[in-house]
Structure formats: structure tokens, C-alpha cells
Amino acid sequence: MSTETFHAQPDEKYDTTNLVSKQILKIILFILVLAILLFVSSGRVTWVMAWVYICVYMVGTIINALLIIPHKPDLLIERTRIKKDAKKWDRIFAPFMAGLSPALTVIVAGLDARFGWSPQIPLVLQITAIAVALLGHLLLTWAMVTNNFFSAVVRIQNDRGHSVVTTGPYRYVRHPGYVGIIAFGLATPLMLGTLWAFIPALFMLCISVARTALEDRTLKEELAGYNDYAEHVRYRLLPGIW
């Protein structure tokens, strides 16, 4: 999918300053909610790895915001406005991946930290998980910067001149954004020192794989040029596997 610039139609009026302010407020609120869920479920604010998790998420989000907000206002509009033509099945998948899955994962992790269900996770694994989470967030940002059609929901953006992107991470897999989301999601339990949180994290993995397959099928059926691209870039998420 290319990075052509999209301009709002004459009858579409957007207050860019207000939009950016709302986006920043949304990010702050989401981080606050994550902190509340972590510390309430764990019963303490001295949980070091919870603070590390929040910092990792903040760093990734700030980098994303600095690259997207000033340089991709059209993408920001696309990701925040209501899309009536979003695929019906994605109205279930999108909210789960964006909010419910992270919430369930951190709640279970917090309860595990409070009641000690899991054995001690080696520090080296936790540090490795931090690196994986950061890389996952950076891969997601790379995909968003490369793809001007990186919508929050699955839809064919005919109103924006939707076309196929073949540059950046899309040279290697067809859905690199999902790879980044999955990497961050699966690194979270280890980062927080819990095994039980892998239950919602693995459920998120299943949802992500299903959503990838459905989105890929939609693009093949409805987006011109995507079948040729899929012939060239054979794998959806993992080179050599799927």
C-alpha cells in the first residue's frame, strides 16, 4: 500500500489542532488506565516490573506519536473517524486487540503478582522480553509510517485512493503491523513475570491470526494489485512459516 497523500473532501471539515489534542489525551488516558489496572490488581504501587512495562509502553507510544501526528495527519484522521464501511467481523476483532486483550493481560499479571501463582521468572528472560516488546512497538510504528492506509479497522479505502504498499517492512511480510502487535503482546507476560497472563495473550494471538487471514482474504478479493503483491511476498506474518 502506497504512501500517497490523502486530502479530506471539501464537505469534510476537521479541526487538526483539536484532533491532535484528542489523540494526545487518548494516549494519556490509556496509559493511566493501564497503570490503574496493574496497581489495583496487584495491590501495590511498588511493583517494579509494572513501572518498567508502563515506561516501555510510553516510550513506544511517544515515538509513534512523534512520527505519526506531525507527519501523517491524514492517517490520524483515518484512524480516529467512524468508518461505516468497516467489515462487520472486524467490529468484534478490532476492539479486542486494541483494548480488551491488553486489559485482560495486565489484570491477570497483576493478580499473579499479588497471589504468587507463577514461579519466579529469570531476570534475563524479563530483560529479553523488554527488548522484544520495544522492537514489536517499533515494527508497528514502521508499518504505520510506511503505510498511509494503516486504518484502525479493516476496510477498502476507496475514498482515499487505496493502493498496495510494497516498501518498508511490507517487503518481507504482508502484515508487519500485526507482527509488532503480537510481539508486544506475547512479551508482556514475561516482562511482568507471569505465566498465567499467557492465557489472554495467547487468545490475543489467535484473534490476531484470524484477523490477519480475514483481512488478507478481503484485500485479495477487493484491492487491485494485491494478488500480484501476495505472489511476490508469500508470507503473511512469519517468513518461511505463514
Image: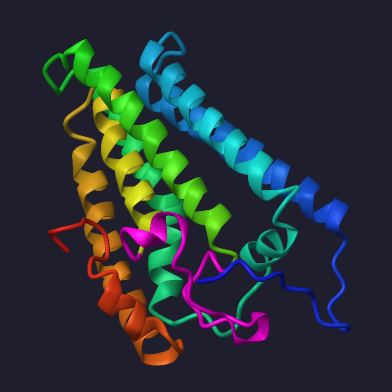
Q: Residue at x 34, y 66 (%)?
A: 174
Q: Height in image: 239 above or below 86?
A: above
Q: Height in image: 162 above or below 168?
A: below
Q: Residue at x 60, y 83 (%)?
A: 84
Magenta part of the chain: 149-174
- Residue 215 percent location from the top left of the image: 36, 75
Q: Main secondary structure of the magenta part?
A: loop
Is 217 on the left or on the right of 74, as rendered?
A: left
Between residue 61 and residue 82, name the one nearer to us. Answer: 61
Is 29 on the left or on the right of 90, as rendered?
A: right
- Residue 139 percent location from the top left of the image: 42, 45
Query: Where, quadrant-wise, is the C terminus in this rendering?
Result: bottom left
Q: Residue at x 60, y 65 (%)?
A: 148
Q: Is residue 150 magenta?
A: yes
- Residue 216 percent location from the top left of the image: 33, 76
Residue 88 position by quadrant: bottom left
Q: Is residue 231 magenta?
A: no
Is 78 on the left or on the right of 237, as rendered?
A: right
Q: How many marks?
A: 0
Q: Residue at x 37, y 49 (%)?
A: 181
Q: Height in image: 101 above or below 38?
A: below
Residue 192 position by quadrant: top left
Between residue 236 and residue 115, name the one nearer to us. Answer: 236
